[in-house]
Every structure is written in structure tokens, then in C-alpha cells.
Amino acid sequence: MRVLLLGPFDIRDDKDQPLDLAGARLRALVARLAFEAGREVSADTLIDAIWEDDATSANALQALVSRVRRAIGADKVVRGAAGYKLAVEPGDVDLVRFERLAETGRRGGDLTALREADGLWRGPALADLLDYRFAQNEALRLERLRTETTRERLALEVATGTDVLAELEPLAAAHALDERWQALHMRALYATGRPAEALDVYEQTRERLADELGADPSSELADLHLQILRQSSAPAPKPARRSNLKSLLTSFVGREDDLASLADAVAAARLVTVTGPGGAGKTRLSVETAAAIAAKGGAPDGVWLVELASTTDGSDVAPAVLRAIGARESGLLEPSAHGAAARLEEYFGGQDALIVLDNCEHQLDAVADLASRLLGACPRLRILATSREALAIGGERLFPIPPLPLSTEDPESSPAVRLFCERAAAVRPDFKLDDSNIDAVVEICRRLDGLPLAVELAAARMRALDAAQIASRLDDRFALLAGSDRTAPARHRTLSAVIAWSWDLLSETERALAMRLCVYPAGVALERVDDLDALAGLVEKSLVDRDGERYRMLETIRSYAVARLEESGDAEAMADEMAERCIELAERSDQELRTAAQITAMARLTAEHGNLVTVIGRAAATADVETGLRMLAALFWYWQLRGSYSEFRHWAEAVLAVPAEIPEHLQSAALIVSGVAATAKGGFLAGQDDIRAGIAKGEALEPGAPGQFLVTMAPAFLPDAGPADGRGLEGWELGTALIIEAAGESQTRGLEGAAPADRAEAVFAEIGERWGLASSLRIKAERLGWEGRLEEGVQAADEAARLLDELGTYGDASEAYAELALWRARNGDVEGSHEALERAIALADTVREPNSMAYARWFQLPVLISEGRYRDAIAVIPDIEGALDGATGLGERIKVLTSSFKDLVVLLQGEGRPEAVAAISAANIEGAAVADLAMACRVSAAAALLDDDAARAARLLGFARALLGIDDGRGYDTELRTEERAREALGDKAFEEAYDAGAKLGRDSAVAELTGAAQ
């Protein structure tokens, strides 16, 4: 027998059948005995609990016990020496089992136990016994324990990389002054790549504590705030997500055997496709399977859910996977070396990972092509797909999903019935399966062919109807629709009938909202819904799901709603309304991307992505070139920040191919989009003519006009943009132009060329934009290093890394942390240097961008040398050079630097001859940055002293000074005392003459001097 108290009182016999225990006092007696299951409770205690202040006799208690025995069995309530006991095992009482599981989970960090403990709750504890003081006190204690247990579970979920924000946020709001809840909320936000929002939670909590309690945050909360600010430690072992699976808010009912079988299939085959009709539960089964595989460590490099329902074009499949894993094609403002599919091959090349491709039927051919390509290139990757039909590629294993079974011998334990009962109880808490309704419930499940979605839709009607009424109405509905489509499979007709019935029962306002929502494949945010009552009605009726802060329809229901919308004749009007809303949202968000609100804007555009590209696709299909170009212009910088170059190029080509006249005010945008798309495909030299023409044509545009931002940004894609001051820019556009100018000029003119970065920093600091500020700080840190201001360089590099990490551009953040590691090492902070380097490498491994990975690993070399670990430095050089082999874009800079460090190690060790720089080709030296050449010159100058050629050493030192514009203060060669020794060997006058001669060397002569060709 089981006694269930975590919710409405329920008692079950040995066959799990409900026992009828009428009367509040009878239930109260069993409940009080169940608190101490298997142990005797004194008669006085029982009398006090049940009659409270009303005096009664032991005879009244004995009579009550007799009535209970008749209802549940004489052997279940046993008389003892001074009272009675309930003859059940403690584990058969849900509240006792809950306490044990909670204790086990909290003491040992057992997430499985905590999940099971939370799953025992069916509602408020002792919900229908709260007229009794003993129940009130116990319920209060249990609710507190439940809160603690839930918080412990959510903390472990966050630590394992699970996104639990949808469940956590309302709990944190309900405990606004509880710092433990707020700390967990901050950790969860940080773990899902939203550090700015985590910092906002801290500020809001600090203000509430001050206003309401007159207190400051605890040291623990303040420390967490500081950690997030410094980005010095992640709340989970990995700095970025290894899974995007979300914590599901409803229980998984009825497919336990299928779950195990599907997990076995995924273990045995690298491509498994779960097939079945809409509403069969393919997605839920696959997500549960993926979560189980992740929990057991079966895919250590990541488990990723890719939702394809909102994709509108086959070309969006590979970018959708990139978005899901949080990766980009290449660095910011860099042309894509390959494309989205090639980038995925690169990302998953050596990874033991699992991708769940959901709703593949929307883009079947494109999914099949991508799956075949990835499985061929990535030997440890596995794919679990859901589709209404097979992908039909080699190696595919099909997993047809059966209906939920319905047992004729034991129908109440059947999965279909269990699902109905659980969902019915969610909308009608007093619902119980009993003799009065079991036949009707079984009939409902039988008529619905065990289709989970159909069962859930029917159960949602239990708020207004009973089971018998639902069963009879289903009979009417099936009779009405029996001849509607005899060619469709039976299960398709069944689901259509239930959806049609649910649709017909909607109010006019609910139906109108449903038709408005169905045109949004990616769902909508709450702010986009005008009628909240209608939305609540659609959610209650299981026609709309809440996904975090967004509301969306299941694809099966959305397809039905789309068909009804088309029948109504309002489809075009709704699509036009959607286009207007999406243009407004995209253009507003585009402006915010260049302000302090850019993180929020990025998240908004990512959430709306499926809707936005739907608008672009419709514009291309209907020759609406104005809408298409406005959307391209509004999404241009978002795509750049995301590194989604192939996606930008695809939609640009689609819109520009429309045979329609381009409005005058958008012609400049069209030219620039065309030119930039060409650079994304063919490199920086492609598309220059169109870009220049677009800039010239856009000079007359008013500030804020659609596409005007493109005109000011376009010079970034030209090799000769010219000084920023000569272009009449201001604000963000001025700051960006200054950064681009400083980044290019500092490579060729050293200290003087880096100067515009200071002005850029001031511009971006004023507007609060993270990318620009971080970019200017990175240039500033390098310049401070040249000047020998190493401590200030550390501060600038630290802030740059933090800002990029906060923004979520992990490839750029990885590079910034690597640079921070170097400046910390040069400043003597060994421990801090290794922390930064570890984070740089971890972030690079997470995003798996080849350039970022090579760049981060390369910094091991100067860090080790700065620490004096010369042998370790020599040992890592082969691996570092191997990492650089496949990297594009780093080129000559790293080659010259690595050779310089090789020679530097030889010189610092005092063993052997430095020969690496002399062996570099003149072509490599010609292409290197001046700071790298300056280092090569100074190292070669030290090497010249080994040959007693102090004059050559002085010439090279002079050339290094002329290149950089200052004597290099980075400190890598301080121990060599090169200038001091050369001056001692030559004397001041001769040294100065040779030094000045070196400063006057032309680049060709200096290259010859550097490589030894002049000797």
C-alpha cells in the first residue's frame, strides 16, 4: 500500500488502485500515522492531532480506527501498547521517501536522487488536510525542505551545463531577498552566456537589500559578483556550454522502454532517425534520450539540440547547427574561409559528440546532405534525427515510434492512460482515476490511437468536461470527420480530428490569436502578444507551449492553424503584419547592437531568427525587394558579430536576384550588400567596385535611414578606407573607423599608427558598446607594452577579455585572454598568467575556431619563456608549430615571432647558436608587423654580439626603434642587456653612429641585415 501526501491526499492498494477513504478525519488519521510509518504513535498524540482543542475519548479514536480498517484493510492499522501504527514500509509514504531522497541527494550531490525527490510532488503538501494544525505545521516544514531540495537540484543542473532558467527565474523572483536563490540565478545566467544579465541580478538584489532590509550583500554574493566581473572562474568546469538541452517542465510518461531501446540504438549506430507521424512524441523521446546519454557521459564533447522547424530554406540547416552550438564561421570582419558546413566539419572533426536534428522533414534533402557530410568527415560524431520520413542515406538506422500502448488486462497502468491522468491532474488537481471514469479514459486513449499529442489535447479539456463527456464528443467528432480524407493514414486522421475539435472549441479571440501566432515559426515573445487572456487560454489547452520567455506552437498544430488561416483569406494580411513587425524589431535591434544594450539585442535577434529569415524568404519569393533589402541592412551587423557569413551571402544573393526595380533610397544598400557578399565569398579584394559605388551613392542618405549604417561601415571592407577624420563620422561609426585605422596602421607604423585607438576607446566607453571598447583596449594594451607600461597593459587586456567574454564572442575572447596571459607573465604574475591562458585555451577548444585555437596555444611559448621555463618552452614549440599549420590569417606574424622566440631561448640559455630568424625567408619578413620585426631585430642584435659584431647589433637596435617608433619596452630581452653590451663594446659615439645608421635603413636593406644576407 502507498500513501501519497505530497499533493492532495491519496492512498493506493497493493495493485496501485485508489482506495476510497471518505471523511476528513479518516484521511487525517492515516496521514498522521504515515508521518511515522511502521512506528507506533500514541493515542494521545493522535487525539490531539485530529480533535485538537475538542475533548474526546479513546473510544472515539477506536471507532475512527475501525472505519479506517474497513476501508484499507484490518491488517494495515495495528494496535500497539499505547497507540497505533500504520503497517507500511517508510518508502511507501511519499513524504518519507522524499525526505530520504532529498537527504541523499543533498549530502552526496546526487542529481538523480534530487530529480526523483522533486518528481514526487503532485501539488502543495497535504493540500486537502490544511484545516488541521498538525498538517499545517508539517506542510510548512515540507515546503521549506522542498525549496531547499529544488535549489540544490538546480545548482547541480547548472553545474552540469543544463539550461534551467525557465524553471529557475520564477523561483528566484519569489525569493527576491534570499541571496542563495539570487546567487544561483546569477550562476545560471552566466553559465548560459548571459553575464551582463547576471550582473544586473546582483545590482537589483543589492538595491532590494538596501531598500527593504538596510543591509549589504553577503560576502559570498559579493565574491560571486567579483568573479563574474573578472571572468576569473566559471561556475561550471567548462567556460561555455557543452549542451543546449533545456530542463523540461513536464514529466516523461509512458515511453520508458522506448527510451532504453533508443539509447541502445544510438550507441550501436552513428545515425538513428526516429520516425512517426506528427504528435507521436518523436521530439520528446529524442530529447530525453539525449539527456540520458549526456548524464551518463556518453557524449563528452557535447549534446546539441538543433530545432529545424523554423528553417525556411535548405541553406539555413548548417547555420542552424552553428547557432545551436554557439559557433561562428570565422572571426569578426574576416571573410569566411569555407562556409557553414565546412566549419561544422572543422568543429566536430575530433569530437565525441551527439547532435539531435529535430523536425528534419522541413528540409529533408539539405539535412540528408549535411548529415552524410558530417558523418563522413567526423568519425566520432553521432546524429539522432526526428522526421516523418527517413533521411535515406547510407548507415541510417530507423527507429519507428509506436503509439503509447494500452493494456486490456491492466488498462490503468497503461502508458497512454498514465499520460492522460497526469496531464488531466495538471488542469484539474482533484482528478483521480477510479471506477467511475476508468472506462471513459480508456476509451479516450483507444480512440486516440495512443498518440501523445492527441491524448494531451484531450486531457487539457478536463478543466471544463469530465472523461465521459470528452469520450462522447470524440465519438461525434470522428463521425463528422470520418470521410474528410480517407487517403490519409489512420493516425493522421485521428490527430487531425482531435486538433480540429480543440480548434472548434476555442473562443473567437483565442482563434484569432492562434492564426496570428502560426505565421511565426520561431514563436513570439510575450511583449508581442496583445491579448494575454487569449494566450493563457491557448497555453491551458495545450495548443501553445511556453519555451522560456517565448511562446510557440508545436509544428503539427501550427500546420493546422496555417491551413485555417489560408482558408480565412487573411493569410497575406497576417504575413504583411508579420513583415512589418519583424522589420521594426530588426531595425530597432540593429541600433541597439551598437549601444550598451547589445547583449540583449543579440539575444533577441537570435531568438527571432527563424521569423526574420522567413520574412526575407517571402520577400525574395514575392519580389518585395524593399522588404528584403531593409532586412538585409538591419541584420548585417548581427551576422557579422555572429560570423554567419554564408547565411548573409545566401540571403543577399536571394534578394539581389529578384527581378524588380530597387527603390532609390536602397540602391546604395544593394550595392554594398552585393560587394560585401562578394568579399565574404572571394576575400577582401572581391566586390570593391560595388562597395565604392554604394558608398558614393549613399552620401546623400539622411542619418538613420534604412541602409545608412552600411554606408558608414562599408569602408571597413576596403583596403584603402582613408583616415577616419576625413569621412565626417561620429559615434559608433567613428569609433569603428578609428579601430580599423589603428589596427592596420599599428601593423605598419608602430606607436604612431596605434594612436587612434585611444580616441576609439573614449567613443565606445561613452556609448557602452562592448565589442568596440574591447577591440580598442586590445590595441591599447599592445601599445602600452611597447612603451614598457606593463601594469597598465595588464589592466587594459583584462578589461578587453572580460568584455568579449561577456558579449559571448568566445573566439575573440580566447585571443584576448591569451594576450592577457602574456602581459600578466611579463608583469611577474605567474599564477594569473596561467589562469588567463587556461581560459583562453578552454574557450578556443569550445568554439574550435582554428585561428583562435592556434593563437591561444601559441601564447604558451612567450608565457613559459617569461617564467624562465626554457626547457618547457623548447618542448612545446613542435606542438605549437603543428597547431599553426592549418591556421589561416595568422601567417607571417606568427612565423616571425616563433622564430624570434626560438632564438631568444637559445640566447637566454646560453647554449647553441641562434639561427631561426636568419633562416626565415625575406617574403615572410616583408609581410610581418612592425612590432614582430622589431623583436626579430632585437633578438638578432643580441645574436650579433655572440659574433663580436657590436656594430651590426647597434644597427639592428636602431632599425627596431625606427620600426616601432620607440625603444621596445616589452621586456622579453631585458636579461640580455643587448644595448648596454653593444654600447660598452663600441663606445658611445660609435654606438650612436651605428644606431642612427640602422634607423635610416630602408626596408629592403633592413631585411637583408636581419637575415644576414648583407654580410
Image: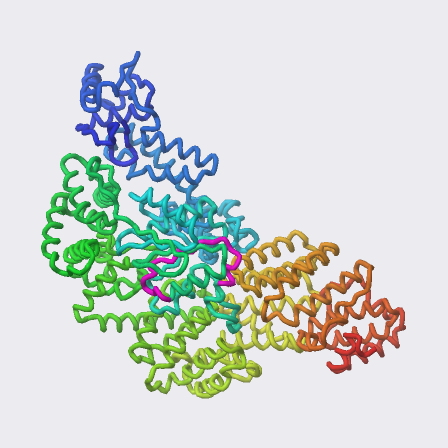
Q: Is residue 237 above or below residue 439?
A: below
Asked whether the viewer can see residue 172, the reply is no
Residue 459 left/right relative to 398:
left
Q: In which quarter of the image is the C terminus?
A: bottom right
Residue 542 left/right relative to 759:
left
Q: In this view, does 722 lie above or below 805?
A: below
Q: In which quarter of the image is the N terminus?
A: top left
Snapshot quadrant of residue 709 = bottom left
Q: Where is residue 107 in the image (x, y as percent from the top left)?
A: 47, 34
The one of 743 and 928 positioned closer to us in this rendering? 928
Q: Provide the residue span drawn in magenta.
A: 345-365
Asked whether the viewer can see residue 571, the reply is yes
Q: Please tell me whether residue 126 belongs to the stretch shown in magenta.
A: no
Q: Please tell me whether residue 356 belongs to the stretch shown in magenta.
A: yes
Q: Residue farthest to the front?
A: 394
Q: Residue at x 30, y 80 (%)?
A: 623
Q: Which residue is drawn at 24% across and 27% down?
A: 28
Q: Where is residue 156 in the image (x, y as percent from the top left)?
A: 45, 44
The one of 447 and 75 positioned closer to us in this rendering? 447
Circle count: 0
Snapshot quadrant of residue 549 = bottom left
Q: Which residue is drawn at 77% across and 81% down?
A: 1005
Q: In this view, does 894 lie above or below 17?
A: below
Q: Position of residue 955 (x, y in %)?
A: 81, 76
Residue 804 left/right relative to 404:
right
Q: Position of residue 648 (x, y in %)?
A: 43, 73
Tell me the colour scheme of the image.
rainbow
Q: In this view, does 396 lie above or below 81?
A: below
Snapshot quadrant of residue 915 = bottom right
Residue 646 left/right relative to 951:
left
